[in-house]
Image (cartoon, rainbow, N blue to C red):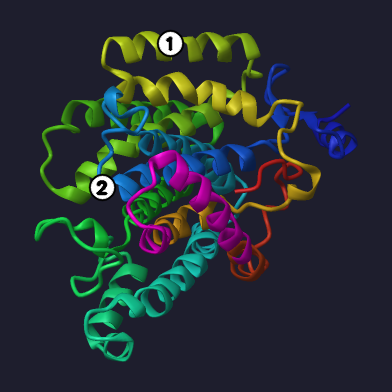
């Protein structure tokens, strides 16, 4: 039986055998939406402590060297490296690939930026809502945000709640999560260029692996010596993206094992004990994440299937938490703030998915005709 016949017969199953080797399995990664939603939720969780108390000192993982939300960002980039690599392999041309990435990121970013700038912020402007809305500097900052020229969504004349002192920047930050968006786009460009150079094809995969491992080594060597902010942010998450790319290569030859995933997760304990958890995290969780993504059980309710609100949770978590801090006051702890912020954020994220993100994805180019049946949604 030919590989084409085998794929055709098994396309309707949860997993299908693929053609480069008997151990290579293409799995339907239906749990990735749950993982991305979890990662986005950790970001809201961390920012709830920061915004509620003005400090991350009481955040549960602050003592490990990074807060919970940063580990959530690492998870995001591992999954992104895995899924976007698969998307690149299934897309005919580099322009088509970049169009798919644009449609996934840009519409929701533009709309959320406009909503925050012109609906959320004006009531808190020192000179009044009308003066704020017609101020040309506001539009200028919006354009910088949506063009990825700036990640600092901050208005000096906006305060969501009283500042503790003149140096207190937190009450004026309209959205503090946008720094990762342009890093994500850099990752798209990197993966797209590797795909355009055919580095994901079998004969050139050793070159791809060498490049990715070299990036990891260089990042680990220079991450703490770079002073330029956006480069240091890139180096912070680049190992996670690279781990996702390598996992995409690995699952072509190896079906992830739950026992190996469990063994890898146990490494988090000594990593935390010896103070190297931030550096080791992506290497220890990449394999378990991909195993969980393709596991037979589904932790999400049936009604959630086909809905990915994680990006919206990420975009709207900060401004909604700022609003709650304004209306409720300074008497909440981080856990209480999370209990209020997360449901409201998920509601806003669902609206973003239903009316912005999902309609935009209808314009995605078709996948390659010679690609196997789609089992990954990126």
Residue in the foreground of this view, choosing between 237 and 122 = 122
Identify which residue is drawn at 61% across, 69% down: 360
Side (left or right) of 13 relative to 309: right
x and y percentages locating residue 155 in the rendered image: 23, 71
Most common secondary structure along the magenta stretch: helix
Residues at badges 1 and 2 in contact (C-beta under 8 Å)? no
- Dot 1: what SS? loop
Residue 252 in view, yes or no: no
Vertical side of 315 occupied by 221: above or below: above
Mark 1–mark 2 distance (CA, rounded to whole Å) = 32 Å
Which label belongs to residue 177?
none
The percent coordinates of residue 73 (x first, y second) are 41, 40
Q: How crowded is mark 1: few (under 14 residues within 10 Å), some or many (20 or more)?
A: some
- Name the quadrant of the N terminus: top right
Residue 54 is marked as: 2
Residue 221 shown left or right of residue 166 in the figure: right
On the image, numbered disc 1 is attached to which residue?
267
- Vertical side of 83 occupied by 329: above or below: below
Q: What stretch is highlighted in magenta?
A: 322-351
């Amino acid at each position: 039986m030919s590989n084409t016949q085998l794929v055709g017969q098994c396309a309707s199953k949860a997993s299908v055998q693929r053609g480069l080797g008997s151990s290579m399995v293409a799995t339907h990664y239906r749990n990735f939406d749950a993982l991305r939603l979890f990662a986005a939720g950790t970001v809201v969780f961390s920012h709830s402590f920061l915004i509620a108390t003005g400090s991350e000192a009481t955040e549960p993982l602050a003592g490990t060297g990074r807060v919970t939300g940063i580990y959530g960002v690492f998870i995001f980039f591992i999954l992104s490296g895995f899924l976007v690599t698969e998307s690149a392999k299934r897309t005919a041309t580099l322009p088509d690939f970049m169009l798919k990435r644009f449609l996934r990121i840009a519409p929701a970013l533009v709309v959320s930026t406009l909503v925050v700038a012109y609906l959320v912020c004006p009531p808190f402007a020192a000179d009044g809502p009308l003066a704020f809305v017609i101020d040309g500097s506001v539009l200028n900052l919006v354009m910088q945000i949506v063009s990825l020229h700036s990640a600092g969504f901050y208005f000096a004349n906006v305060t969501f709640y009283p500042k503790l002192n003149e140096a207190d920047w937190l009450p004026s930050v309209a959205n503090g999560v946008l720094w990762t968006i342009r890093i994500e786009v850099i990752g798209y460009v990197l993966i797209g260029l590797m795909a355009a150079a055919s580095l994901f094809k079998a004969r050139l995969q050793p070159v791809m692996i060498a490049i990715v491992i070299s990036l990891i080594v260089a990042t680990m060597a220079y991450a703490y010596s770079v002073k330029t902010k956006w480069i240091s942010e890139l180096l912070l998450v680049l190992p996670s993206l690279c781990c996702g790319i390598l996992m995409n290569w690995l699952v072509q030859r190896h079906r992830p094992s739950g026992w190996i995933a469990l063994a890898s997760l146990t490494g988090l304990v000594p990593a935390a004990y010896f103070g190297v958890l931030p550096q080791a995290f992506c290497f220890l969780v990449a394999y378990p994440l991909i195993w969980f993504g393709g596991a037979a059980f589904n932790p999400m309710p049936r009604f959630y299937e086909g809905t990915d609100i994680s990006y919206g949770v990420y975009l709207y978590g900060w401004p909604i938490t700022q609003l709650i801090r304004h209306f409720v006051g300074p008497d909440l702890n981080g856990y209480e703030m999370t209990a209020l912020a997360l449901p409201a954020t998920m509601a806003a994220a669902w609206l973003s998915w239903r009316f912005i993100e999902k309609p935009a994805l209808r314009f995605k180019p078709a996948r390659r005709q010679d690609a196997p049946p789609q089992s990954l949604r990126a």
